[in-house]
Each structure stands twice: as C-alpha cells, then as structure tokens.
Image (tube, rainbow, N blue to C red):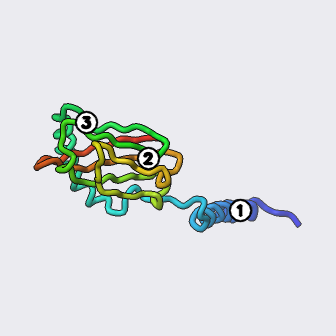
Amino acid sequence: MKINWGTGIVIAFVAFISFIMYFIITMSTDDKYDFDLVTEDYYGQELEFQEDLNKEEHSKTLKTNITWKKSDEGVILIFPEDLDINTIKGKVFLYRPSDKQFDFEIPISLSNHNLLIPDKRLLGGRWNITVDWKYNTNSYIYKTEITY
C-alpha cells in the first residue's frame, strides 16, 4: 500500500495533536505539576499595598528596626530595645513560596524583646517573613526573606 502526501499530512497532524493532548492531560492531572497562587485574595491585598508602604515609612523612623537570628530552637525575631514590650501588638506571617500548606501566622508575644518562631514549624528552604505590628498608635511592618 502506497501512502500519498495528503495521507502523510493527515497522519502528521493527528500525531502532533495526540502528542500535545498527552502533555496537556499529564500536566493537568498529575499532582507533581500542581501549582499554587501567591495568594487567594490577590486584589484585596493589592488594595492594602499603599497602607503597607506607609507602615514601611514608619519603620524607617525607628532608631533600630527588627532583626532576626537563627538559633537551635528556631528563628528569633529581635524587637527594638528602646520600646516597651507590653504595648507591642501584632502578628507574624510566615509564607512558604514553594507550598502554601506550610504558611502560618502567629500573634506577637514577646519575652525580653524577643519572639521565637519554633524550629518544629519551619522546614528547610525559603521563607518570607512579614511582621505587621503596632506600637502605641503607629503601625509598622517588617519584611524579610530567610533560608532556613
């Protein structure tokens, strides 16, 4: 049986379409290729962006900003020594870019100007830390990226 050029073109199209459909089905059904959005409420967070910029400007007025250090117990956030720890309120949000299942938030509860983020909550890899806090009437924000 002889295949003419028209039949060859049809076979080539069918093979190409089958090849593409195989990859589309594989990518959409296999959990290995699953992806997460950066945040579920993207537009809501976009509206809060100017507020975050204002908080960052307030943070620049501090004598010293928040710092962090790694220890055996986890990550220690060190708040400025010249502030009264009883009037500091807020929350710490830890964002894991590779998997949103590990994201978590903890309230600020200071002891001796330090806040410990326990080692058992942190997996190895990259973390984005956002400390959204208030001292008296001023709001501040501290953002950093760490590799644990």
* Percent of width and height locating residue 72: 49, 42
Mark 1 lies on residue: 15
Question: What's the amino acid at mark 2?
Answer: Trp
Q: Nearer the viewer, mark 2 or mark 3?
A: 3
Q: Residues within 10 Å of mark 2 (few under 14, many from 20)?
A: many
Asked whether the beta carbons under mark 2 and mark 3 sit within 8 Å of each other, the answer is no
Report the label total: 3
Task: Please tell me which of labels 1 and 3 falls first in the chain.
Answer: 1
x, y percentage for residue 121? 47, 55
The Cα–Cα distance between marks 1 and 3, rounded to whole angstroms, is: 61 Å
Observer-side mark, 2 or 1, equals 2
Q: Residue furthest right?
A: 1
Q: Where does residue 77 sit, x and y in percent of width and height?
A: 34, 42
Disc 2 target residue: 127
Q: Residue furthest left?
A: 137
Q: Nearer the viewer, mark 1 or mark 3?
A: 3
Q: Residue at x 75, y 64 (%)?
A: 7
| Residue 35 shows in this picture | yes
Residue 65's disc number: 3
- Residue at image position (35%, 58%) is 105
Tag 3: amino acid: Asn
- Within the image, what quadrant is residue 38 found in? bottom left
In the picture, measured across the screen, residue 83 lies left or right of residue 76, that is left
**Three-letter code, disc 1:** Ala
Residue 139, above or below 1: above
Rendered location of residue 110, percent (x, y): 29, 49
